[in-house]
Amino acid sequence: MTAETTTPPAAAPSQATGPLFYQAPVPLRSDLHAAWRLVPDTAHFAADTNAIPAVIGEFGSLAQHYPIIFTGKDAMPVVAVGLAQRNLFVANDLWDEQSYVPAYVRRYPFVFMQAGEQDEYVLALDSAARQVNQGQSEDGLPLFQDGKATEVVDNAMRFCGDYTREHDATRRFTAALIENSLLIDRNIDVTLADGRQMSINGFQVVDVEKFAALPDATVVAWHRNGWLALVHHHLSSLARFSALVNRQSALPADA
């Protein structure tokens, strides 16, 4: 199994059965993948989703560009990147250069997979990714040379390690939100510039009144560990829904 699972996107009719984007992740091995290479690619793989998993270490950056919301029974955070089943920040296979690219997107096609014990992971990558050249040509950067991992693999190991630690920290934060009953269901009805109406549902946000009523001891503890700032980033990010409406309004009705 993979090191983390993703939650279903907001307002999406289909349910994700595994990590978003990953179709055929395989553990990397120097003997089996000696000829494999990584080809620099675009964000085409993220074009058909309306939500991207997020981790708390990037809340400050994410809040400037996207609504941060919570979904699923574990209330894991995602950023809303669309109102329908489309990413409004990907055009012509490129991510909007003026917007922060979520870490989950930057990690792809690499990922950690659990191996044996609960806290043991191995580096894997999505063998079905367009970025992966399985030795058909010399295009791209080699993953291994002379039986040893290259800088590409070393960098991926560090990034995936950092992401996994952030993911674990994010779980602790959302568990605290649930424990303190701070999350409430939220639905949003929007009207586009041409009069079309859309509904966004299936997500949760922090209840401002319950948040303000937290016991003093909890407030002090959350201030010290940075969780108060995370809640404020989340709440301020909800204003970014208007930016999503503007982006959707700029598209043709059949888009």
Image (spheres, rainbow, N blue to C red):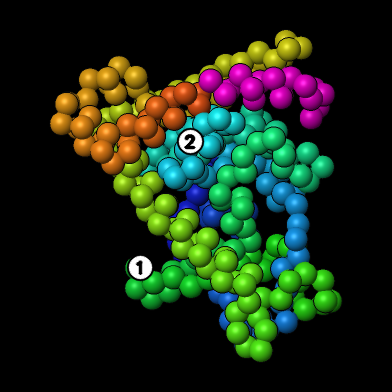
At label 1, the amino acid type is: Asp
Residue 222 lies in the magenta stretch: no
Q: Is residue 104 left or right of residue 128?
A: left
24 versus 17 height, above or below: below
> Which circle marks residue 119 in the picture?
1
Residue 243 lies in the magenta stretch: yes
- At numbered mark 2, what does the secondary structure look like: helix, strand or loop? helix
Mark 2 neighbour density, 10 Å: few (under 14) some (14–19) many (20 or more): some
Mark 1 neighbour density, 10 Å: few (under 14) some (14–19) many (20 or more): few
119 versus 148 height, above or below: above
Quadrant housing the C terminus? top right
Q: Position of residue 32 (x, y in %)?
A: 64, 85
Q: Is residue 10 left or right of residue 32?
A: left
Q: Which mark lies nearer to you, 1 or 2?
A: 2
Q: Considering depth in this image, is 115 or 90 the residue closer to the camera?
A: 90
Residue at the image position 27 percent from the left and 34 percent from the top: 223
Q: In this rendering, does residue 126 appear at all?
A: yes
> Which circle marks residue 60 in the picture?
2
Q: Position of residue 163 (x, y in %)?
A: 47, 56
Residue bounds of the magenta highlight: 239-255
Q: Considering depth in this image, is 100 or 2 the residue closer to the camera?
A: 100
> Which circle marks residue 27 in the picture?
none
- At numbered mark 1, what does the secondary structure look like: helix, strand or loop? loop
Give the prevailing secondary structure in the magenta stretch.
helix
Q: What's the CA distance linking mark 1 and mark 2?
A: 28 Å
At label 2, the amino acid type is: Gly
Residue at the image position 73 percent from the left and 12 percent from the top: 193
Residue at the image position 36 percent from the left and 50 percent from the top: 169
Q: Reading the chain from its start, which is encountered first: label 1 or label 2?
A: 2
Quarter of the rendering containing residue 222: top left
Q: Position of residue 178 (x, y in %)?
A: 30, 36
Quarter of the rendering containing residue 102: top right
